[in-house]
Image (spheres, helix red, strand yellow):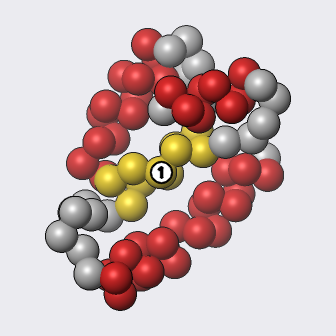
């Protein structure tokens, strides 16, 4: 979230992407950083042990959401 907030402050659209395990942490971070409007997208957990094909599927599942978040 820190990078997303930094880019947004610079006037550059940004979105964080995180594992669904970190949904609460993302909320806490964006409030703590003073940017409740900072966007993030959650992908299905887990990430660390996912195969390349599983990661591609996770990315494909959220790509439209990422594009939408960046173009709002």
Using the image, determine if residue 45 lies above or below residue 51.
above
Position of 63 relative to 38 (above/below): below
Question: Horizontal and vertical percent for residue 13?
Answer: 75, 41
Q: Residue furthest bottom?
A: 53
Residue nearer the viewer, 37 or 55: 55
In the picture of the structure, the residue carrying the numbered disc 1 is 17
Q: Report if residue 37 is visible in the image.
A: no
Q: Residue furthest left?
A: 49
- Residue 47 appears in view: yes
- Callout 1 crowding tier (Cα within 10 Å): few <14, some 14–19, many ≥20: some
In the image, what residue occupies the spot 62% across and 58% down? 66
Question: Where is residue 57 drawn, in percent x and y?
Answer: 41, 81
Q: Secondary structure at mark 1?
A: strand
Q: Is residue 72 left or right of residue 1?
A: right
- x, y percent for residue 7: 69, 31
Q: Is residue 27 left or right of residue 70?
A: left
């Amino acid at each position: 979230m820190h990078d997303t907030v930094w880019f947004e402050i610079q006037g550059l659209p940004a979105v964080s992407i995180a594992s669904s395990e970190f949904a609460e942490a993302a909320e806490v971070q964006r409030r703590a950083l003073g940017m409740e409007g900072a966007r993030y997208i959650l992908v299905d957990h887990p990430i660390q042990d996912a195969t390349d094909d599983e990661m591609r599927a996770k990315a494909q599942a959220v790509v439209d959401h990422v594009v939408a978040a960046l173009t709002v």
